[in-house]
Image (cartoon, rainbow, N blue to C red):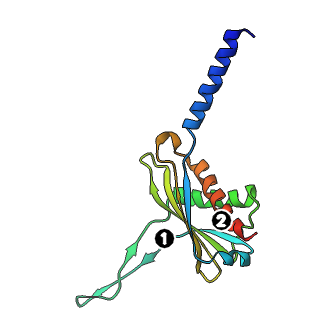
Amino acid sequence: MTNTQSRLGTIALIAGQFLLSGCASNASSTVSNYKPAAYANIKGWQVKLAFETGEVSSTVKEGKVTEVKVASSGNSSTELTLREDLYYYLKDSKGVNVTPTGDGVILVSIDRYKDNGRIAGVTVRMADSTGEVISRMKVKNGDRNNTFLDTEEFTRFIGDSIIKEIGKKN
């Protein structure tokens, strides 16, 4: 190898590392713990959307509202995909005991979207079998286009953040 080739190789290596470090994600999560000792009692987890859609109805009689009818459509495909992908990521890739009837519940809600439709932020609440919140986590995607994770990568980041939190019991 000539001296010139060696220098070009070194420059290419440095440029590659610079480009990779400039494209690194800066996704982050912050956790508020309310009952961290409760994790020790959770044997299995459910993964649910925090806000399921539903219907409430109302009727107006003699000028008084006795019932209110509000119908909403089902959850978005993004929410349903996030829930399913998170369920299988935790179960299959990370070995977390995730079942439809677990005694702990991971409640996920999408806070906001980016202009391009990708998920920009999520709130995750971990609750015990009584519904009492053990901890609450805010997970934020990257803040610049080159650091913004796609949906699959962001789902894995959320899952890893959850595992880090619930793993405190072990």
Residue holding disc 1: 53
Q: Quadrant of the C terminus?
A: bottom right
The residue at 44%/49% (across/down) is 114
Residue at 55% in and 54% down: 28
At x 62%, y 78%, the residue is 35
| Residue 79 spot, x, y in % from top left | 53, 60
Please identify, in this view, whether the residue under mark 2 or under mark 1 is nearer the observer. Answer: 2
The quadrant of the image that shows the N terminus is top right
Circle 1 crowding by C-alpha within 10 Å: few under 14, some 14–19, many from 20: few
Please give left or right for residue 110 compared with residue 134 in the image.
left
Q: For the view shown, which residue lies furthest in the left direction?
A: 63
Point out residue 21 in the picture as x, y percentages from the top left corner: 58, 37
In the foreground, 88 or 111 = 111
Q: CA distance from mark 2 to mark 1?
A: 28 Å
Q: Note whether 120 is above or below 132 in the view shown.
A: above
Does 50 appear above or below 5? below
Disc ID at residue 125: none
Q: Amino acid at mark 1?
A: Thr
- For residue 158, which quarter of the picture? bottom right
Which residue is pictured at 69% across the width and 71% down the height?
Answer: 45
SS for dot 2: helix
Q: Is residue 96 left or right of residue 154?
A: right
- Picture coordinates of residue 101 (x, y %)? 70, 75
Residue designated by label 2: 165
Tell me which label, 2 or 1, sits earlier in the chain: 1
Q: Residues within 10 Å of mark 2 (few under 14, many from 20)?
A: some
Amino acid type, callout 2: Glu
Secondary-structure class at tag 1? loop
Q: Position of residue 63 (x, y in %)?
A: 22, 88
Residues 167 and 50: in front is 167
Q: Is residue 19 above or below residue 72?
A: above
